[in-house]
Structures are given as structure tokens and as C-alpha cells.
Image (cartoon, helix red, strand yellow):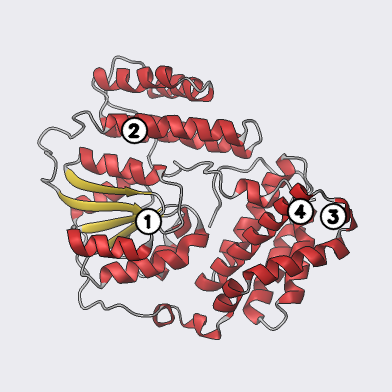
Amino acid sequence: MMHTAIGTVSGTGAGSGEGAGSGAEPRGGGTGSVTQLRTALWRAVTARDERAAGKVVFGALDVGVTSEEVLLDVIVPVQVRVGAEWAAGRIGVAQEHAATAIHDRIIAAMAHRNTADAGCAPGTAGSVTVACVDGEWHALPARILAEVLRGRGYEVDFLGAQVPTPHLVAHMHRTAPDLLALSSSLPTRLPGAHTAITAVQALGIPVLVGGAAFGRDGRHARLLGADAWAPDARAAADLLGRGVPRPRGVTAHLPDDDLPHLTDQEYTLVVHGKARLVRNTLAGLERHLPVMRAYTDAQRERTAEDVAHVVDFLAAALYTDDVRLFTGFLDWTAGILEVRGVPATALGPALVVLAEELMDFPRALRLLERGRAVLDARDPRPPVPGPGTPA
């Protein structure tokens, strides 16, 4: 029942550019309206025509549209649409990946042009390191931010996706930038983000965070003690322009110091017991869903991936003590399943079995109970889900 589900949807990068721009009209002229530019770029990337996409982008730059406007008002909305079309089941994972890859290569090519605005020579505004949290492979939002900051005169050290925290901290100690901009799209990476934030702050370097993982309102940024949060790349650049103070008197400390609820060890025990939880949940699902006994090896493997994602989001919700993180994931996943013809009720039995496995974990049981309530209350004909996992 679940084998087309969570494992497929959580790691595709759908909507990976969401929130990076404001959608304002570019001020440049000569290539038509922003709507026409977006339409032309959309047609190019969905046709996997990188040359045509390049002509749209560089043609706009050639007639005076600024790099920032092309990035945030043209490329970002098209990338968001790519994610929405994937979520709606109208394009496949491979086509979504192809469109994202074209955007990534075009943005990299833009970096070799003189993208700084007049009077904003590289380095005149300060130095910023831009990186993705350990385990975070969605690098496009971070790359977009890096290029926006370059255009505003910052010396940018872009480290890309999936930067292991010990190596990030060592790099920050060696290079000593004015600020670290840390990006994460998946809430399951929040514990790693917390470790990175506190370690970098202990060096006296402020940390600005962004991305869907930190919540639409930045609540997870505040929870983890980040020095600043921005909802998109333009807001982040504006915030840096106003200045982010360096942390004072910050020392490395344990997560429990910031999040006292972690002292109950539920998060730690769920993470350490993940393999057992997945294995036992699969066995329990066969009791609740007899059809699983006829699954092929490939179907069983995919279902195991699905259950693993449920456990990952449960653990993240335990870490943050935020029920909305878990229920939002389940609600979004149910919508994705239904679009693809899989009943959302397939998620319920997994939560029941997990509750049996975690009967001595009161916070986890409350999360699972709320999750089941959200699934039970869903409209049988939900709207097409948008891109990204709401936090």
C-alpha cells in the first residue's frame, strides 16, 4: 500500500527553490515582462533544453535585467513551479531533477559574469560562508543566496551541499568569515543544524539560517538559537546589509542546555533504535495489511524506506518538541499519496504499529496520536499539495 510513498517524495528536491525570491517585477527591460521570461524558462527546462534556458537567462541579463532579479524573480518562481508540478504528479522525479540541474548549471555560469552591482566590488560588503547542513543535499537555495550576496559585494565562500559539521567548524576556524549562512530544506536535519550553530557561535561567528527546515515563520531558527533567520534570499541579503552582531560570550554546550525536554532521552532512544523500529514496524504492518505478504522484494524495500522517513520525522519532532513538524509531514505525504492513487489510509497502520513499539515513550505516543487524528480528519478529496514539506 505504501510502496509508492514517502521514500519517493521526501528526497527528490521538489520545490527546492521555494521562498528564495519575492516574485517582484524585474526593473530591466527589452525581453518582455517577468511573466514572459518565466514562461520561456519554464518551457525550456521542462523540455530539458539547456541551451534555450540559457538564452532566456543571459538574454535578460544582456538587456539590463540584474542578476539578482533574474535569480529571484525568474529562476526561483520557475523552480517553485517545477516542485508544484511534481507534487501534483504532472511531471516525474527525473524531469524534476533535470529542470533543477539546468537551473543549477545556469546559475553557476552566471557566477562567471560580472554580477556585482555598481559600487559593490567583491568583498567590499564583507565575507560570508554559505553552506548546507550536514546531510542536506538540496543545495540550490544556498547557491542562489550565494550569488545574490556576491552581487551585493560580499566575498562569498560557497561550500555546497552536505557539509559535515566537524569539517565546517574547522573551515570556519581557519577562514574566520564575518558570518555563516546555513541552509536546510528538510526538518530531519535540524539536530545537525543545532550542533553546527552552537559550534560556530563558539568561535564568535554569527549564524544566519534559512530554508524550509526552520519553519515558514523561523520558529525552529529561534528554538536552536541562531543569530538571525530570513525567509528568502532577498530578505537575507537585506538583513546582512543592516548588520548581524557577533555572538558574545557563547561557548560550546550540549543540546539539552537549549532544549530541556531532551533530558527524557526519547529522541536519542528513537534515533539509536531506528533500525529495530523499522524492522518491527514492517513485521507489524503485515498483520494489519495482509496484502503486504504478497509484496515483491522491491516493494518491501520501498516500504521500509517509507517507514524510515516516518521515524526520521518523528525523531525530528521529538528533538524540537513541535507536533506540527510531524503532523505537517504526514498531511503533506498523504496528499502526495492520494495524487498518485495510493489511499492515505495506508499511513495509519504504520503509526499504530509504531505506537505499540514506543508504548513507554509518552511524548512519542502523543505525537503519533496527533498524527492519526490529522490523517483521520483529512478531506477525502484534498487539494493538490504544493511543493516542499511544511514544517
Q: Residues within 10 Å of mark 3 (few under 14, many from 20)?
A: some
Sequence-first disc among 1 and 4: 1
For residue 107, which numbered disc appears in the image?
Answer: 2
Q: Is residue 343 visible?
A: yes
Indicate the secondary structure of the residue bearing disc 2.
helix
Is residue 95 or residue 233 the one in the foreground? 95
Q: Position of residue 195 (x, y in %)?
A: 38, 70
Mark-to-mark CA distance, 4 and 2: 39 Å
The quadrant in which residue 148 appears is: top left
Q: Amino acid at mark 4?
A: Arg
* Tag 4–tag 3 contact (CB < 8 Å): yes
Q: Please report the residue visible at 69 percent of the width from the left and 76 percent of the height from the top.
A: 365
Tell me which residue sits at (18%, 35%) in the image: 116
Q: Where is 307 relative to 21, above or below?
A: below
Mark 2 or mark 3, which is nearer to you? 3
For marks 2 and 3, give the CA distance: 45 Å
Q: Nearer the viewer, mark 4 or mark 2?
A: 4
Real-space Cα separation, disc 1 to disc 2, in angstroms = 20 Å
Mark linked to residue 300? 4
Contact (Cβ within 8 Å) of mark 2 with mark 3: no
Instruction: Please give the label number shown on residue 163.
Output: 1
Q: Earlier in the sequence, mark 4 or mark 3?
A: 3
| On screen, residue 192 above or below 39 | below
Gap in angstroms between the C-alphas marked 1 and 3: 38 Å
Disc 3 designates what residue? 292
- Name the amino acid type tagged 3: Met
Query: N-terminal of the two: label 1 or label 2?
Result: 2
* SS assignment at label 3: helix
